[in-house]
Amino acid sequence: MNRTIRPLVAADRSGVFRILENAGNFTPEEVATALELIDEWLELGEHSGYLTYVLEAKEGDGTAVLGYVTFGPTPLTESTFDLYWIAVDKLKHRGGVGKRLLKFTEEEIVRRGGKMLLIETSSQETYGGTIQFYERTGYELVGKIPEYYKVGDDKLIFAKRLANPAAESVADIDAEPAKAPSSTTPAGF
């Protein structure tokens, strides 16, 4: 199976809508909001501020959208980006689709000069797998706003500093030996 990440096009909208509806943890209002961002991307492209990509699989004569991601530069910052949406076909969970989309997002942000990615999510039990996914991929919980979305539903804010491997390797040549970190961070996979 050949898998490709590419910019979302209008023909992908229905596949992404299906993924969002079947996810099981998005309300109708959240699905509508995700589609609004997609529509802005389709209308304005890069100027929308919502960079939107899909991971598609080519099987035989057809293709299928397995997941999508929307991210963009955080207004009024120099090099911070926000992850607005990432969703994977429920049948493809634990198949590496989300991990591949997130890795692509991080690489694309670094390519665009970004240095940090922020992710906001819900504390609801239905988001437990999502929270674990972020922790396993090296994101640190940096903030929690109690009852942000509604009573009993906190806003969780995850962050990860992104590094430019080329810049790091040049910096490492002249740098002093690194000190051991004072705390541990979740290991990526």
Image: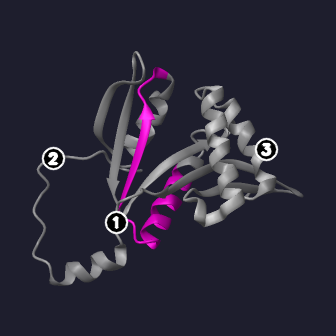
Q: Is residue 6 visible?
A: no
Q: CA distance from mark 2 to mark 1?
A: 27 Å
Report the span colored magenta.
99-125
Instruction: Determine contact: label 3, label 2, CB under 8 Å.
Output: no
Q: How is the image coloured?
A: one colour
The kind of residue on which mark 3 rests is: Ser
Q: Earlier in the sequence, mark 2 or mark 1?
A: 1
Q: At 59% across and 59% down in the image, what residue appears?
A: 48
Res. 121 image quadrant: top left
Q: Earlier in the sequence, mark 1 or mark 3?
A: 3
Q: Which residue is mark 2?
A: 183
Around disc 1, counting alpha carbons within 10 Å, would you say few (fewer than 14), some (14 to 19), or many (20 or more)? Answer: few
Q: Residue 83's x, y, as percent? A: 48, 50
Q: Is residue 164 visible?
A: yes
| Label 2 residue SS | loop
Query: Of discs 3 and 2, which sits in the foreground?
Result: 3
The kind of residue on which mark 2 rests is: Ser
Around disc 2, counting alpha carbons within 10 Å, would you say few (fewer than 14), some (14 to 19), or many (20 or more)? Answer: few
* Residue that extends furthest to the front in the rendered view of this protein: 76
Residue 166 painted magenta: no
Residue 123 painted magenta: yes
Q: Residue 142's x, y, as percent? A: 27, 41
Q: Which residue is mark 1?
A: 78
Q: At 39% across and 66% down in the image, what residue appears?
A: 114
Q: Can you tell which mark lies on residue 115?
A: none
| Label 1 residue SS | loop
Q: Residue 30's x, y, as percent? A: 60, 32
The kind of residue on which mark 1 rests is: Glu
Residue 7 higher or lower than 113, as above or below: above
Q: Can you tell which mark lies on residue 14?
A: 3
Query: Of discs 2 and 1, which sits in the foreground?
Result: 1
